Amino acid sequence: MSTTTKPVNQKAWLLILPVFICVAFSAILPLMTVVNYSVQDIISPERRVFVGTEWFASVMRDSDLHAALLRQLTFSLAVLVIEIPLGIALALSMPATGWKASAVLVIVALSLLIPWNVVGTIWQIYGRADIGLLGAALKGLGFDYSYTGYANDAWMTVLVMDVWHWTPLVALLGYAGLRSIPDAYYQAARIDGASKFAVFRYIQLPKMRGVLMIAVLLRFMDSFMIYTEPFVLTGGGPGNATTFLSQYLTQKAVGQFDLGPAAAFSLIYFLIILLLCFILYNWMQRVGTADKEAV
Amino acid sequence: MQKRSVFLILYIVFALLPIYWMVNMSFKTNQEILSSFTIFPQHFTWDNYRTIFTDRSWYSGYINSLIYVAINTVISITVALPAAYAFSRYSFLGDKHVFFWLLTNRMTPPAVFLLPFFQLYTTVGLMDTHVAVALAHLVFNVPLAVWILEGFMSGIPREIDETAYIDGYSFPRFFVTIFLPLIKAGVGVAAFFCFMFSWVELLLARTLTSVNAKPIVATMTRTVSASGMDWATLAAAGVLTIVPGAIVIWFVRHYIAKGFAMGRV
């Protein structure tokens, strides 16, 4: 949301109302249920004991959780550092008009449309050194590669898979943002004799700021909740190398039938994502405003 | 050749190789997939596709998914358009908070919502209907649509609205005939993303359906069975899941690629 002054109009709430109802119905009710679970020990549907903040305290002290959180932070950071610049570069190099533009658009979007469990399954074969293209190619180049054997290989494979799967999201958003820049801006830049980099830095990047903000937040929160792909590909292994937060949560909730701790865990999980997104959002907003003042 | 086309070609190769491998697998037999490394299928077969097109439990999955995804996309975009306009044009009590709150609904791991959703939809009697899945998917699609559309709307100068009102346009007429064409790119992208996220979502869709509305993503999990993975059928089903989305993006590509029409007219 831009921070420039806008006319005050309380009636605008009427325009928000449909969205508010839709989301409140499917979000606030379920969230309250989870809060309810998190403060109880549910022995059976009939027998519940109020335990207050006990679950929260025990979850916070869980050292496996700290390890999973650290792995998760590293992974999400790596995802952002690779996918955002790559996505912007891709958006800039995609052709703007003609059949080539249509073809490239469709090809780029393909990986997004594959269900996540299939993505994991395909990469499972694709990465195998005996029967998969990627694994065989790496072996042919002389690497001793195995995503089931070595922690680093597993981690890198999950990362490359995520880059393959999700960079198109950044690219498509950036591309649509680029296409909505009026020609007048480019003409003005041409008259001023601006360099290619200057056009990017002072026209394209600021104009893409809105969509890039969405891209950064989406990629951050989705990578922070990544579950299906690593679960199918590596099952969290070898060891715990690719056990990310949500898999750890699911192990708790499903594997051990601990509804209470699992609910407390998911609330803490949610608050971590919320906090980090809030920081990212405000930071990007500030960078954008400072930019506007500088120009 | 230009540097950027080299980069583009390299990326396209990187993007297409895993997909090629999936297509390749879909024309093989399970035995060939697991026993040897072959760039092309040695025993080319259509059997995997035949299984999907002749077995009702397979192809009805595609139909079910398409129905709820379409309902979801239409509702998401319809409610998001006016809301995004309000956020981009006016300031009102709690606007910034509501805007950010919307996005927080995407930040909860979907697994958390499973049990509450199950209880909620059983209570209102919507279990195993397309509407139930479409409504549940609103949680993550409406906030996304509002954010994307708001981004595009904020890029349109407010003078355009003011001129239209001075010219005597009513709000609905201005919105449909002047404003919407200006943000076509945004609507195209938002619709595509709503389609995509609803199409690939597995956990909620599987929990809220059993027979009548069972989606293709849930049907696919059948390929894991006691006798081992049915890799070939899964690959063929995977290839077929790409097709509807590719058609959608083919139809919205003009909206995305043309974008802002002003200044060229």
Image: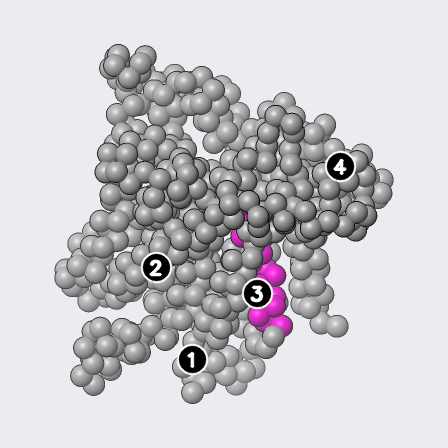
Q: How many angstroms separate mark 4 from mark 1 (CA)?
A: 54 Å
Which numbered tag is attached to residue B74?
A: 2
Q: Position of residue A192 (x, y in %)?
A: 52, 82
The local secondary structure at tag 1 comes to loop
Viewer-nearest of discs 3 and 4 = 4
Q: CA distance from mark 2 to mark 1?
A: 24 Å
- Mark 4 and mark 2 lie on one chain; the one further toward the N terminus is 4
Query: Which comes sooner in the sequence, label 2 or label 1?
Result: 2
Count up the numbered dots. 4
Q: Give the Cα distance between marks 3 and 1.
A: 19 Å
- Which is more toward the observer, B68 or B183? B68
Q: Which mark is residue B150?
A: none
Q: Which residue is mark 4?
A: B31
Chain of the residue where label 3 is placed in the rendered structure: A
Does the CB distance between marks 2 and 1 fall below 8 Å? no
Give the chain of mark 1. B
- Residue highlighted by disc 1: B261
Q: Which residues are magenta?
A: A100-116
Residue bearing mark 3: A105
Secondary structure, mark 2, is: helix
Residue A104 painted magenta = yes
- Disc 4, disc 2: CB below 8 Å? no
Q: What secondary structure predominates along the stretch shown in magenta?
A: helix
